[in-house]
Amino acid sequence: MKLMKQTPDGWEYRLNQKETDSLCFLVSQFPVVPPSRARISRTDSDPKSDEREKLLNESLAEHRRDLKKKARHLVDPDKFKLLKKNRVFRVGTEDREILLQILNDIRVESWRILGEPENLEIDPLQLSHESLRHYHYMHLAGYFEHHLIVS
C-alpha cells in the first residue's frame, strides 16, 4: 500500500491485489468480538445509574451498527479502480478517519483476545486456530493503519 496522491478532497493509495483483498476481508470482519455490556461504575449506588448504563449501552450499540454499515461502504468495489496490475483506493477525510477507527478497533480487540501480550512477537506455531486468526488480524490491521497514517 503506497500513497499516490493527497488532495484537499482526500487520499489515493495504490494497493496490489493481495492488499486489496486483505483490506476488504479485514474490514468485513468488523467487529471481531460481540458487544459487551459497559458499566459506568461498579460501586455507584445511585438509582439513576442503571438508567445511565442502559442509555450508554444503547448508544454504543447504535454507534457500532453505524460503524459496521460504514465499514461495508468503505470497501465497496467501486472504491477500488483498476490501474494496470494494481488498484487505486480513493478515500476522503471522513472515510479515512472511520477506516482508521475500524482498523484500530480490530487491532485492539484482537490484542485483547490474545491476552494483551506485552511482546507482540508471538510464535504463531504456539497459537490455537482461533488465536492465530486474531494474531493475523492484529498485525494486518496495524499494517494498514501504518500505511494510512505514515504515507
Image: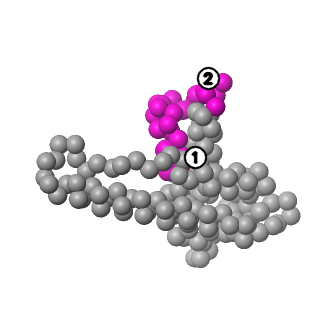
Q: Is residue 94 above or below residue 68?
A: below
Q: Is residue 144 visible?
A: no
Q: Is residue 110 magenta?
A: yes
Question: Height in image: 128 above or below 19?
Answer: above
Q: Residue at x 50, y 57 (%)?
A: 101
Q: Farthest residue in the right direction?
A: 84
The magenta-colored residue range is: 105-129
- Farthest bottom residue in view: 9
Tell me if mark 1 has few (under 14), some (14-19) or many (20+) residues whose alpha carbon lies within 10 angstroms of its own.
Answer: some
**What amino acid type is highlighted by mark number 1?**
Gly
Nearer-the-camera pick, 86 or 21: 21
x and y percentages locating residue 17 in the rendered image: 79, 55
- Asked whether, in this view, residue 144 is left or right of residue 17, the answer is left
In three-dimensional space, the C-alpha distance between marks 1 and 2, rounded to whole angstroms, equals 21 Å
Left or right of 49 on screen, residue 55: right
* Disc on res. 120: none
Q: Residue 72: give x, y in percent of width and height.
A: 61, 63
Q: Quadrant of the N terminus?
A: bottom right
Residue at x 61%, y 55% (from the top left corner): 27
Q: Which residue is pictured at 19% across the width and 54% down the height?
A: 49
Magenta stretch: includes residue 24: no
Work out whether residue 55 or residue 79 is closer to the camera in this orientation and state it.
55
Picture disc at residue 126 = 2
Left or right of 7? Residue 52 is left
**Mark 1–mark 2 CB contact (< 8 Å):** no
Q: Which mark is residue 142?
A: 1
Instruction: Name the amino acid type tagged 2.
Output: Gln
Residue 55 x/y as whole percent: 30, 61
Which of disc 2 and disc 1 is earlier in sequence? 2
Residue lying at 42% horizontally and 59% vertically, measured from the top left: 61
